[in-house]
Image: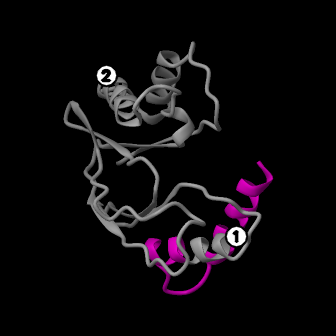
Amino acid sequence: MARMAQQRHALAGLAHAPGTHAGQLTTWLNELLCADPAAGTATGIIGHIDAERRFRWACAGHPAPLLWRDGAASALDTEHRGPLFGLLPGHAYGTATAELRRGDLLLLYTDGMVERRGEDIADSVDTLRKVLARCGGLGPQDALDRILEAYACDEHEDDTCLVALGVD
């Protein structure tokens, strides 16, 4: 838990550098973790949504965000996905852009939400995607409530966090 707090605070400091973008921030955070032998590895997504509703994001070994749009839910493309933080010094992370529309719901989640012993993570992500698909017409808070209700009996072995962003 302390390592995650250090990484979050490091990212907050790096984010104030002028002219940075998601790929650059991800690259810098990776370099910090690679330089600290006690840091270990971590996954993550770093991104922002601009005034034109473009979600620009970089991915360090993390499952893709999910997007609910027009009655269906899908995972964003992760072709640009890079290695876990702390694994490969010198790696330059790419940035992808997803055009968001009014009414979209973007779901970000920690890998602890979908990792299960003995289960393929792709199957677990697909299960979460199916739950999100049933959240049509709901606002972010109601969608989170429905997802948490669907997972109420699950025991999570890792940290679990969900963030839902409604696009106006």
> What is the spatial separation of the Cα atoms under label 1 and label 2, in whole angstroms?
36 Å
Looking at the rendered structure, the secondary structure element under dot 2 is loop
Answer with left or right where residue 13 lies relative to residue 22. right
Going by the picture, which residue comes out furthest to the bottom? Answer: 18
Secondary structure of the residue carrying tag 1 is: helix
Q: Is residue 54 visible?
A: yes
* Magenta region, residue range: 1-27
Mark 1 sits on what residue? 10
Between 104 and 81, which is closer to the camera in this rendering?
A: 81
Residue bearing the label numbered 2: 134
Residue 126 x %, y %: 32, 31
**Mark 1: which amino acid?**
Ala
Circles 1, 2 touching at the beta carbon (< 8 Å)? no
Q: Is residue 15 visible?
A: no
Badge 2: residue crowd in 10 Å (few <14, some 14–19, many ≥20): some
Q: Which residue is depicted at the point 74% across and 69% down?
A: 37
89, above or below 154, in the image? below
Q: Is residue 131 above or below residue 82?
A: above
Tell me what residue is drawn at x 39 percent, y 47 percent: 65
Q: Residue at x 50, y 81 (%)?
A: 20
Closer to us: 163 or 74:
74
Q: Is residue 14 magenta?
A: yes
Which residue corresponds to the image point at 29% horizontal and 27% vertical from the top-left? 133
> Residue 168 appears at what percent x and percent y?
35, 48
Viewer-nearest residue: 126 or 163:
126
Please say whether residue 4 is one of the residues in the magenta stretch: yes
